[in-house]
Amino acid sequence: PRYFNRVKCGYDWNAYNKTHYDHDNPPPKIVQGYKFNIFYPDLIDKTKTPQYFLERADTENFCILRFSAGPPYEDVAFKIINRQWNKSRKRGFRCTFERGVLSLYYNFASHWYRR
């Protein structure tokens, strides 16, 4: 199937980065989330919704995100960063299948803590 993916990158303004960097000299960008749009226009069984699965990868820092829809399409897999997802709709999580397009949007959970 055809697909359109986007990686959301940005700065992590934690306490360390706030003291060592500023807006003129920013910290290195990190991956904050992903957006996957996978197009299934010719599905034979339109009542069956495509699904996604998380699988182990070769290292602990990555995992494999596999999308499976059934015939006539083969599975599509992507190697992504293995971090906890923020599954709140307010934080940008979306998993829908409408008009032949499977959309999976999510951001990674950020842990705010203080001593």
Image (spheres, rainbow, N blue to C red):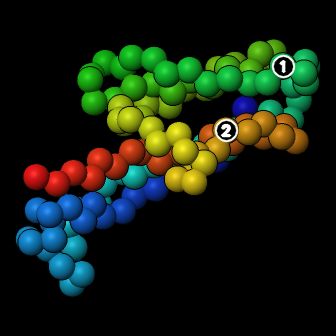
Seen in the picture, residue 85 relative to 70 is either above or below; the reply is below
User: x%, y% of residue 16?
Assistant: 11, 62
Residue drawn 10% across and 52% down? 115
Please tell me whether mark 2 sits on a helix, a strand or a loop. strand
Q: Which residue is mark 1?
A: 48
Q: Which residue is mark 2?
A: 95
Residue drawn 9% across and 72% down? 19
Of labels 2 and 1, earlier in sequence is 1
- Going by the image, does 43 lie left or right of 30? right
User: x%, y% of residue 57?
Assistant: 36, 20
- Going by the image, does 50 lie left or right of 28? right
User: x%, y% of residue 83?
Assistant: 35, 35
Residue drawn 39% across and 26% down? 63
Amino acid of disc 1: Lys
Q: Quadrant of residue 60?
A: top left
Q: In this rendering, which labeled residue sits more in front, label 2 or label 1? A: 2
How many numbered discs, if any? 2
The quarter of the image holding the N terminus is: top right
Mark 2 residue crowding within 10 angstroms, few (<14) / some (14–19) / many (20+): some
Amino acid of disc 2: Cys
User: Given contact means CB atoms under 8 Å apart, are the residues at marks 2 and 1 in contact?
Assistant: no
Please tell me whether mark 1 sits on a helix, a strand or a loop. loop
